[in-house]
Amino acid sequence: MKYKYILLFFCLCMQLTAHSQTDFNNDIEAIEDKVIEWRRDIHEHPELSNREFKTAEKISAHLNRLGLEVETKVGKTGVVGILKGKNEGKTVGLRADIDALPVTERNNLPFKSEVTTQFLGSETGVMHACGHDTHTAILMGVAEVLSKHKDKINGTVKFIFQPAEEGAPPGEEGGAALMIKEGVLKNPDVDAIFGLHIDSEVPVGTITYKPEGIMAAVERFVINVQGKQTHGSQPWSGVDPVMISAKITDGLQTIISRESKLTDAAAVITVGKISGGVRFNIIPETVEMIGTIRTLDPAMKELILRRMKEMVPALAEAYGAKASIEIENKTSITYNDIELTEKMLPSLKKVAGNENVKLVKATTGGEDFSFFQEKVPGLYFFLGGKPLNSTEAAPHHTPDFYIDESGLVLGLKAMSQLAIDYLNQQ
């Protein structure tokens, strides 16, 4: 008889859990249209890094309506909301980035961005060309759903709406690093953090992930080559920094092709801008080179940075010039904690289906979510945003970047499920 009651109790628990999950999913489905509406409004009114004033107002107003504890102006324009569950427990962080890019939109959408601004001295359009508008809308939706299910939460959820993921303007601090500096992972202390990124080249309904390094560390470098100005018809009378810049560019690539063990991990050195000279018949005195370094392995990163610092001045000296190099860290390796990834993988499969959660290789793109992961265990994954019937997709950071909004609901489910399951698995 005792076993009969145990079996009945177990069946009742299973029924209550199933009923609770149904209510949870129904609330997510019911909010889908609202999330899309938020996304379209944010897309139509994009704001650059550290200038996300209206976006922050929209987010904070929403979180206040939900009754969350809200803090604004974190990391300049960031917003943080705190939702306390029914019982005491751990604290989980959920993060979305909110800034747009200096890109002029070319899509023909009814909510197309027509915003223009001055950026580094040039007139440009402003566009959510990387999908941060979808991340923001998804996390606003997750906050609303979880606020209705506080009884299912053992612990605290901290919603982190982060500005300046694309990098703060010159001379300013910003992004995840500044939020951390100002204590975003404290009071209450965050035990783990989750983040997602929409992917225009992954089909809707798909989640992709990778344990350990999933995105690269990013450095920005500036090289200044000092030559000797002369008439273009008499190069022997001067020292040509343009030619030397070409030699440096070529030399840097040998660090990748001949010194980096690419069978271990990918690495990239790119010179993206070379500036020098004013006239066709004048060899200039100086040339400035600006570029980026991408690495996925800490040891390779150390090697590449050391060799660049050795090679640049040496090559310039070989041709009678001088050169300096400055390297600035932009992001660390976006590193998914192995134990946390394994623990939360069932949650992703629960909402997307086993066949739609796929292991992928790392990308040489960068993410300042990595700074959160240096402080607490984190899991960062990609959410499909490519229409199912599409054969081609515009890359991120381009004027034609496009997202199929039918993929947002899976983001809602994934982030919500991760938060509840993490807190309730204690």
Image (cartoon, rainbow, N blue to C red):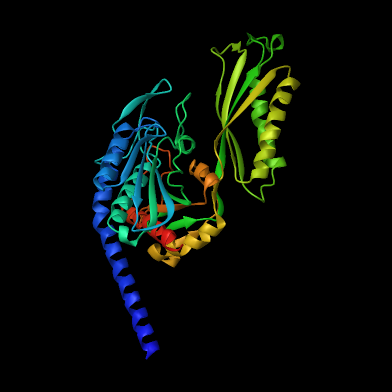
Question: Could you tell me residue 9's position as x and y percent?
Answer: 35, 80
In this rendering, would 144 be left or right of 370? left
Q: Position of residue 89 (x, y in %)?
A: 42, 57
Residue lying farthest to the right in this orientation: 318
Q: Is residue 122 left or right of residue 61?
A: right
Q: Can you tell which quarter of the image residue 99 is in?
A: top left
Please give left or right for residue 150 compared with residue 314 in the image. left
- Give residue 337's position: percent from left, percent from top: 55, 54
Q: Say above or below: 251 vs 224.
A: below
In which image quadrant can residue 106 be found?
top left
Q: Residue at coordinates 40% horizontally, 65% vertically from top-left?
A: 350
> Residue 82, how many percent across, how many down?
35, 47
With respect to residue 265, does 154 lie above or below?
below
- 248 displayed left or right of 135: right
Q: On screen, 92 above or below 40?
A: below
Whether residue 411 appears in this view of the structure is yes
For residue 41, what is the image quadrant? top left
Q: Indicate whether 167 appears above or below 267.
A: above
Q: Can residue 403 be seen from the camera position used here?
A: no
Question: Which residue ends up furthest to the bottom in the rendered image?
Answer: 1
404 or 39: nearer the viewer = 39
Residue at horizontal 52%, vertical 51%? 377
How many marks do you count on the picture?
0
The image quadrant where one finds the N terminus is bottom left
